[in-house]
Amino acid sequence: MSTTRPVALDAMGGDRAPEATVAGAVRAARDFSIPVVLVGDETRLKEELAKHRAAPGLEVVHSGEIIGMDESPGQALLRKRDSSVMVAVNLVRGGRACGVVSAGNSGAMTGAALVRLGLLPGVERPAIASLLPSRRGRVVVLDVGATVDARPEHLLAFARIGEHYARCVLEADRPRVGLLSIGEEPSKGNALVKHTLPLLQESELNFVGNIEGQDVARGKVEVVVCDGFTGNVLLKSVEGYAEFFFEMVKQSLASNWRSRLGALFSRPALQGLARELNYASHGGALLLGVNGVVVIGHGRSNASAVASALRVAKDLADRGVVEALRERFGGEREKARVPVGSGGERESELHG
């Protein structure tokens, strides 16, 4: 179900915006034929675009405000209704864009998606789902940052939506689900893990029990479930050690002439491994549970990472992943979209 609609990009979001975001949008349009709407300060964005060779399919939509990485998401969204992240999400809500990408304040992106797009029926809290490499392919890890203080019923919902997401993107017939803990035994873990375990055991899921951190890389399961705090620590640790590993490899290969000679032959394999472990190659993670394609990129995303995130968003939209999830979790009848300022439930969540 390929769509011709563009992907909306919060071009002011991220540590390297707008230089990296504009360069990434140009690359996505030129290399992947992805139409992009860049949202942000029109003057600054056009100045950045002028530095690049013209690429088809790029459009600029002006927004007058920016939400900084250090701002409180709830307060900022209420004060800055014309922020780039809010305007970008509104393009999805209005049907002008098939999805939205931001490498900016992830809390603001999550809040904007909750307020303007709403949650899928049957989902109480969103979860950021990241795809990590394993010995057996890829594994879906959620949540990696959207819901830091989760309850057992939230983790059960994450498991269900993650299981269906794995069916879509990993093409797994019956994905195995594991609960991240400090030990496989039912007695191990904190209160959240211990109370979640029986819920998953009694569910219809292909639940294999508690798993430990090393089991993620071993590919013991296709879906790893945890709260947003634990998942974010796991994700950042994986990224940090991947960078550290390749720094060590580079130093080792440059240590003497024999190592440098060996590096010439091993370079293609090492480059492939580096691409697999580099966050820039995968771009961003899907915010699962909201009624639209919302991809959250790394705060320090470079142009390559932005282009990859745009490609991820377009691919997910073309696959109809959100539509499949909506059907799985209750159908069109319960779509809820509460506008900012209506006094509804989503508005009150921004104060929390």
Image (tube, helix red, strand yellow):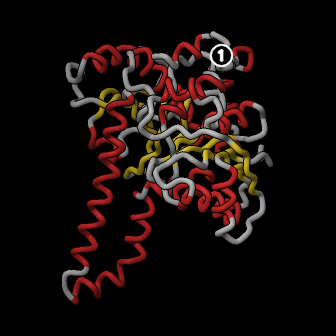
- 104 relative position to 201: left or right: right
Quadrant position of residue 151: top left
Q: Quadrant of the C terminus?
A: top left
Please provide percent x and percent y for residue 287. 54, 34
Count of labels in the image:
1
Q: Quadrant of the N terminus?
A: top right
| Nearer the observer, 231 or 146 | 146
Quadrant position of residue 337: top right
- Density class for disc 1 (Cα within 10 Å; few <14, some 14-19, many ≥20) is few
Please provide percent x and percent y for residue 23. 60, 62
Q: Which residue is mark 1?
A: 341
Task: State whether residue 120 is above or below residue 58.
Answer: above
Please provide percent x and percent y for residue 336. 68, 17
- Going 69% across and 46% down the picture, which residue do you hit? 7
- 24 relative position to 33: left or right: left
Task: State whether residue 121 is above or below residue 244.
Answer: above
- Going 57% across and 41% down the picture, which residue do you hit? 295
| Nearer the observer, 300 or 309 | 300
Can the viewer see residue 47 in this picture?
yes
Secondary structure at numbered mark 1? loop
- Going 51% across and 26% down the picture, which residue do you hit? 126
| Nearer the observer, 205 or 17 | 17
- Going 39% across and 30% down the picture, which residue do you hit? 228
